[in-house]
Amino acid sequence: MTAAEFRAAYPEFSSTVKYPDGAVSGWLDTAEKTVSPDRWGELRARAVGLCAAHYLTMSGDNQDDPGSGGGVVASEKVGALSVSYDSIGYEERAGHWNATSYGRVYYRLARMVGACGVVA
C-alpha cells in the first residue's frame, strides 16, 4: 500500500503537515513487515491500513500532547490535577491497541482471523 492509497482509504490522514509522507510511508512499511499475509489472507490490506492508522494516530496525538498517555479522557479537573479515562469498549489484554479506535478494530479482527488456536 502506498501513502497515496492509504490517504485515499483513510482521508482523516490527508494532512501532510500533521502526517508527513515519510511518517505515513514508514508506518506502512512497518505494518507491511509485521502483518502476516499467511494469517490475514484477503484481509491483509485492511490490517495493514488499520495498523498504520493506529501508529500514526498515536504519533499525531503525541505531537499535540507529548505527555498524553492515550485513551479517551472521560473527565478532567484542574484543581488537584485529576483525570479519568473511559474504558468502555476497550479490548481486554489488548495493551497499546486500546489507545486508538483503529487499534481496537485491528485487535478485534486479529482475534477472529485465523482463530483456529491462534490469538493476537
Image (cartoon, rainbow, N blue to C red):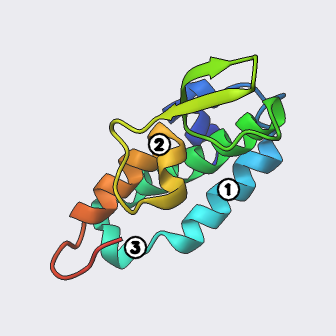
- Distance from disc 3 to disc 1, alpha carbons, whole Å, reads 17 Å
Q: Earlier in the sequence, mark 2 or mark 1?
A: 1
Q: Secondary structure at mark 1?
A: helix
- Distance from disc 3 to disc 2, alpha carbons, whole Å, reads 19 Å
- Compared across the picture, whether 27 is left or right of 87 comes to right
Q: Residue furthest bottom?
A: 117
Residue 119: name its quadrant. bottom left
- Compared across the picture, whether 88 is left or right of 58 comes to left
Return the x and y of residue 27 as percentages of the image width and height.
Answer: 67, 56
> Badge 2: how crowded within 10 Å, few (<14), some, or many (20+)?
many
Q: Earlier in the sequence, mark 3 or mark 1?
A: 1
For the point 40% across and 52% down, the residue is 106
Q: Amino acid at mark 3?
A: Pro
Return the x and y of residue 66 as percentages of the image width and height.
Answer: 83, 40
Residue indicated by mark 2: 102
Marks 3/1 in contact by CB < 8 Å: the verdict is: no
- 116 lies above or below 91: below
Q: Residue furthest front?
A: 80
Residue indicated by mark 3: 37
For the point 42% across and 59% down, the residue is 94
Give the label, 3 or 2, closer to the camera: 2
Where residue 90 is drawn, which disc sits there? none
Q: Secondary structure at mark 3?
A: helix
Return the x and y of residue 74 as percentages of the image width and height.
Answer: 51, 24
> Badge 1: how crowded within 10 Å, few (<14), some, or many (20+)?
many
Depth check: 21 or 80 in front? 80
Q: Amino acid at mark 1?
A: Trp
